[in-house]
Amino acid sequence: MAWTFLWLSLLCVGGGVGVIPEMQRQVVLNHQWVTAREFVDGYTLAQLTPGPNMLIAAFVGYRAHGVPGALLATVAMFLPTSVVTVVVADRWQRWRGHRWAAAVERALAPVGMGLMAAGVYTLAQSALHDTLTAALALIAALALAVRWGPPMLVVVVAGLAGWLLGA
Amino acid sequence: MQLTRVFTWTGILSIGGGRAAFFYEALVVRRRWLRTEEFVQDYTLAQLLPGPNVSNLAITLGHRLRGLPGAGWALLAVIVPGLAVLLVLATIYFGRGLAPATVSLMHGMSAAVVGLLLVTSIRLMRPVLVNARAVVIAVGTFAAVGPLRLNTALVLLAGAALSVWLHRPGPRA
């Protein structure tokens, strides 16, 4: 199981959403740690809870082997790639003054922005399934744009509205 | 330590996906610890490196602000609270299931997160998309990964290579 999640964590390039199909194939079909229904519910729960969505690894690990399974899956998912990121971030701080480093930073920023927009697009497709949810998204965007309140408050109010209106 | 507190709160409060939006709000808009350009650099680095984005983003931001200890605390701050909550929810879920009202609540919240992400993306893009070259690269990446559903890792490698080539420094003066 540790190897499976380590493999999946390496595939998480540019947005965790891209790794979901492969994760489903591994944990539902290959290893049968959870059913397809449990996997979808687990992903929704991971979205609802604080922290990265990839904590779904803990959900799957818990189903397979209880709390030790959850901890093992989490460590496999986060620790190795985090070490890589720390090392690269550390090196990068030192290279930053170099002219090629500056060029690379300028070059990568638009790629990152394109990915972010694609992430919004993908999330919108799964989250906005009727007029009500689309309207809530629009109102939330306006509320943040005019600095009506902190983002968390906007999200909670929208949640309550969804609950009252039966989203 | 103030950094750990801010990251923990942001980690806890950023429910429903789209965590980058919450970090941007907390670190750049509210506290002005970073400039938008710096946030964009860290965000892009976090995306390009393998591993879950949110943990990578917390690490790069924490590292920029406080070096190695900052990176370590930022990582723990975003993972541990969520892990605890998710374990409790998993126990309930596999025990007796969730009520339908919870699902409606979740739908409303994830809709709002799409709105938040939209506003944050627009704010982040302003200092980046300053010339036609940057706009073309961003639109191309978006189209390939979003509507066209091409393999993200491949698009990323190709897009990054092409963009670096287009942005290569000129010959030394």
Image (cartoon, coloured by chain):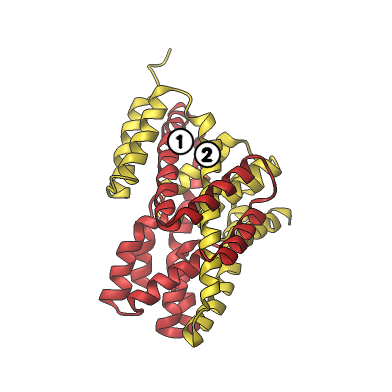
Picture coordinates of residue A148, whole percent (x, y): 69, 45
Chain of the residue on which disc 1 is drawn: A
Disc 2 residue type (three-letter): Val
Q: Residues within 10 Å of mark 2 (few under 14, many from 20)?
A: many
Residue B78 is labelled as none
Callouts 2 and 1 in the same chain:
no
Chain of the residue on which disc 2 is drawn: B
Disc 1 residue type (three-letter): Ala
Q: Residue at x 42, y 82 (%)?
A: A63
Q: Residue at x 47, y 53 (%)?
A: A131
Is A145 displayed left or right of B54 in the figure? right
Picture coordinates of residue A20, whole percent (x, y): 35, 62
User: Which residue in the rendered view is the most extreme toward the top?
Assistant: B173
Question: Where is the C terminus of chain B found, in terms of image quarters?
Answer: top left
Residue B59 visible (yes or no): no
Q: Looking at the image, is A64 positioned above or below residue B171?
A: below
Is B24 displayed left or right of B171 in the figure? right
Residue placed under numbered mark 1 in the picture: A109
**Distance of label 2 from label 1 (alpha carbons):** 6 Å
Q: Which chain is red?
A: A
Task: In this rendered view, identify the residue nearer to me: A167 or B116.
Answer: A167
> For numbered disc 1, what is the local secondary structure?
helix
Is B133 displayed left or right of B90 in the figure? left
Question: Where is the N terminus of chain B found, in terms of image quarters?
Answer: bottom right
Q: Residues within 10 Å of mark 1 (few under 14, many from 20)?
A: many
Q: Are marks 2 and 1 in contact (CB under 8 Å)?
A: yes
Residue B20 visible (yes or no): yes
Picture coordinates of residue B91, whole percent (x, y): 52, 83
Task: In this rendered view, identify the residue nearer to me: A89 or A54.
Answer: A54
Q: Residue at x 46, y 42 (%)?
A: B44
In the rendered image of the structure, the colour used to display chain B is: yellow
Residue B40 is labelled as 2
